[in-house]
Amino acid sequence: MGKRFKCKKQSYILKLSIFILLFIIGFNIGYKILRKKVTNFFENDTYLDYLIKNSFNNQVKYEDFLMPNEILPTFNENNNSLEDPIIYIYSTHDEEEYESNYINPYNINPNVKLASYYLQEQLKNIGINSIVEDKSVGDVIRKNDWVYSKSYEVSRMYLEEAKNNYPSVKYFIDLHRDSSVKEKTTTTYEGKDYAKILFIVGLEQENYEANLEITNRLNEILISNIPTISRGIYKKSGPGVNGIYNQDFDPNCILIEMGGQYNTIVEVSNTIEILAKSIKTLLEEYEKEE
């Protein structure tokens, strides 16, 4: 009787041990799969960390976006302090937003202003100094009770101020977001999703040929990296359109529509990385000619 009870007890302990072992193995496998999915979803944790740490005054904890043991990247907290910038990045319509479903609980609405800062960061990483306009066009419009179409008048003032304050600047990029359907503003290349780029050139100003030339070359370089990333160049003139877009300010003005309202910040940041590399190639070519 005692032996039978002892055998049953040993059998129970063995089964319990096997169950616990299988549970631990299953948990570890499940955790690794989940971790991989989360990491892929937030594949550009550098952008998310920058977005949260530098653009929202720590309203949320960026640690919430990280898995255990992940190392935080470091950033220059004030890239606008860089000496001799050669690119000025601004957004005439600086409140145009991107899709933000998975960060809505944190009250974050990613927009072209944030995309501008990420472009600045990527340019810095490859040795190109730039500045981002940190003043808001939208605030000026609202405070003066102006119509939305006056946005270009506000950004013109910022352009002139930037030129005076930073005489080293040679190139001016106006970053926008399109309003087309996602099928038009998104492409997939080698398993990665990108927000497509559309260039705008206004034909009703004296610099349009020079603007078109530099835009054409950037577009060629861009599609040499990813053939489907560009939607081409939209030349605008005639009744009902601006036709100038402040491109009369300088021959090296470039207007970029990056993605649309249904693109995610991950898709946008993927594109920015390609755009930054393309800009570097463009600048190397132009600097050789001087």
Image: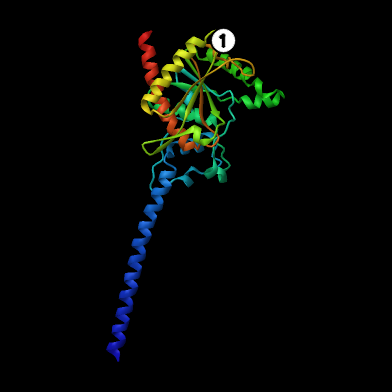
> How far across and down, in percent of the image, does residue 48 sit?
47, 38
In the picture, measured across the screen, residue 200 lies left or right of residue 38, that is right
User: Can residue 257 be seen in this snapshot?
Assistant: yes
Q: Quadrant for residue 122, please give it.
A: top left
Q: Looking at numbered disc 1 in the image, what kind of residue is underneath it?
A: Gln
In the picture, measured across the screen, residue 243 lies left or right of residue 269, that is right
> How far across and down, in percent of the image, does residue 6 sit?
29, 85
> How far across and down, in percent of the image, does residue 140 sit?
66, 24
- In depth, the one of 66 and 192 nearer the eye is 192
Q: Residue at x 63, y 27 (%)?
A: 138
User: Can residue 84 be seen in this snapshot?
Assistant: no
Above or below — where is 192 with respect to 209? below
Check the picture and name the quadrant holding the N terminus. Answer: bottom left
How is this picture coloured? rainbow
Q: Which residue is mark 1?
A: 205
Q: Residue at x 40, y 24 (%)?
A: 222
Check the picture and name the quadrant holding the C terminus. Answer: top left
